[in-house]
Structures are given as C-alpha cells and as structure tokens.
Amino acid sequence: VQLQASGGGSVQAGDSLRLSCAASGRTLDTYTVGWFRQAPGKEREFVASITWSNTKYADSVKGRFMISRDNAKNTVFLQMNSLQPDDTAVYYCAAGVATLSPKYFRYNDWGQGTQVTVSS
C-alpha cells in the first residue's frame, strides 16, 4: 500500500493541526495504521495507531491527539490539539498487520513524512 502524509505546518504552542494519511493501492480496512514522529537527533517514536475499531496512544499525546479513519476515503487522520514545542518533528504514517503495535519495525509501508513545527 502506498501512503501519502500531509497536513503539517508551523504553528504556535496551543494550536491544532490535523494530519492526513491517504492510501492507494490497497484499502486500509485490514491494516493497522500508525503515526510515528522523529525529531532531529532523536529516534523515531510511536504516536498513535488504529485498527478497524481500536486505538492506541503514546502517553505523551493521550488526551491531546486523536487518531481516526475514514474507510470510504481510505484515509487515516491524526487530530493534534494543544500542540507543544516538544511535538516538533517529522510525522510519518505507516501501515502494517500487527495489531496496534507501537514498534516501528512492525510496519511495512511508510509515507514520506510531513513536518510539524511548534513554536513557543
């Protein structure tokens, strides 16, 4: 499956952004889709994942971020609220078959990443 991430940008602390992960080639309804992020000099870290009916979040984003999917559009979204400077990173979406896994190596297909920059 091919993935295209979009929706990043530069915002102020406290603002919101919605990222989109549009898929082509296959439908996403049988996949787990995850969002990961990587800041300069840091390892790629798990943000959130979604299956058909369940979700999982990193502790650092619980209560602020929400992952959802629109199967008709073959797209997964990441609504990010109350953004903080520590959320600054390149955000990637990925698809895999391991249910809700927070491990990046469990995902086979990756989008190109979208930059999110949060200033204080």
Image (cartoon, grey):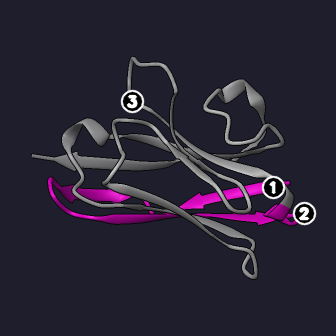
State the residue position of label 1: 2
Picture layout, residue 98 above or below residue 76: above
The percent position of residue 91, horizontal first and vertical second, equals: 49, 45
Say which residue label 2 marks: 25
**Horizontally, is 54 left or right of 25 in the view?**
left
What type is the residue that disc 3 sits on?
Ala
How far apart marks 1 and 2 lie (CA) works out to 6 Å
Could you tell whether 62 is left or right of 34 in the image? left
- Find the residue positioned furthest to the left: 120
Would you say 118 lies left or right of 65 here? left
Locate residue 70: give its quadrant. bottom right
Contact, mark 1 vs mark 2 (Cβ under 8 Å)? yes
Give residue 54's quadrant in the image.
Answer: bottom right
Identify whether 102 is placed above or below 8. above
Other-residue count near label 1 (Cα within 10 Å), few / some / many at <14 / 14–19 / ≥20: some
Q: Position of residue 82 (x, y in %)?
A: 22, 57
